Image: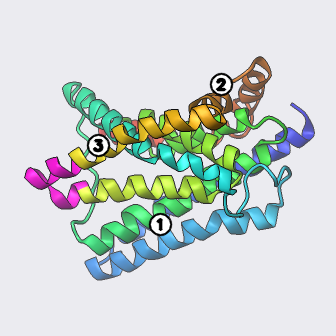
Amino acid sequence: MTGETKRQSTSVAISVVLFLLLRLVGEAIASTLSPTAALAAEAATLLLSALFPLLLFLWMRPCAASAVGFGLPRKRDLRYLLLLPLFVVSVSLLASALTAVFERLGYRYEPALSSDPLHLLVFAALLPALSEELLCRYLCIVPLGDGRPTGAVWISAILFSVLHTNPVQIPYALFAGLFLGAVAVLTRSVWVPILFHLTNNLVSAVFILLGEGVRKSLFEGVLLSLAVLSIPLLLYRWKRSGSILSSLLDAVRPRKSDLLLILEHLLSPISIPILLCLWLTTISCFA
């Protein structure tokens, strides 16, 4: 590993560890406070974790700044929005399947989320989408994505998945991370993956608010219908300007050089936050 690559890996590792510690300390403090004070502590933690990646990036000034930026997506990149319904439905189906599998294995995942609409909107949808995308699709991909960014997409997806520190979420978070990373580098805009992530979180929040019953079934039907209707549009776009799906697959399909780069980074300081997150995942399994 070259000195520059090691420096970049070290900067990303430090960023992820500090981000994780910020979340853990904030949650620990909130658990000792009254409900009102705990809400304020949770808000402060999420706000800081949303600002932290941006501030750290400005301080570190990593290379390859053109890989992903804060600019708005180009007009031709808006075609990737056609994948939004399919992305949300795919993540939801994968999450449901994994939840069922882990329940059969004796592990039940029950996230502690409020049923208050405003709380869900801000703390379960908006702020997590902003903070996690700035960290994983911006702060991680930009310094590691010099040249062909596929290796950086994989590393950012691995970090994104283990940051969830939950055995149910890790597999489908890896799938989501690869998709969001590919969209980020293809559009060169962090706002597109933020939109996808935010939409997925909002859909999850709506499912929680609806509970079980007819309204939830209707909402599921609407989502599935949108996903099905988007397929003809994707085929139409393929005839006009090439396959959107093939572009995504190319962005995440690693070549031999990409595999070597991924291995180099996994053997670098980046392994520290990964092992830390896996340790926290193991603790959650036996808690």
The residue sitting at the left extreme is 213
Q: Nearer the viewer, mark 2 or mark 3?
A: 3
* Left or right placement of residue 27 versus residue 68 in this view: left
Amino acid type at circle 1 is Leu
x then y, percent, for residue 124: 37, 62
Tag 3 residue: 225
Magenta stretch, main secondary structure, is helix
Q: Nearer the viewer, mark 1 or mark 2?
A: 2
Considering the image in quadrants, where does the N terminus appear?
A: top right
Rate crowding at label 3 as few (under 14), some (14 to 19) or many (20 or more) other CA atoms within 10 Å.
some
Q: Which residues are magenta?
A: 207-220
- Write the residue at 73% across / 52% down: 68
Give the distance between the C-alpha atoms of the residues marked 2 and 3, in whole angstroms: 29 Å
Q: Is residue 218 magenta?
A: yes
Q: Nearer the viewer, residue 229 or 27?
A: 229
Amino acid type at circle 3 is Ser
Q: Nearer the viewer, mark 3 or mark 1?
A: 3
The residue sitting at the right extreme is 3
Q: Which mark is residue 191?
A: none
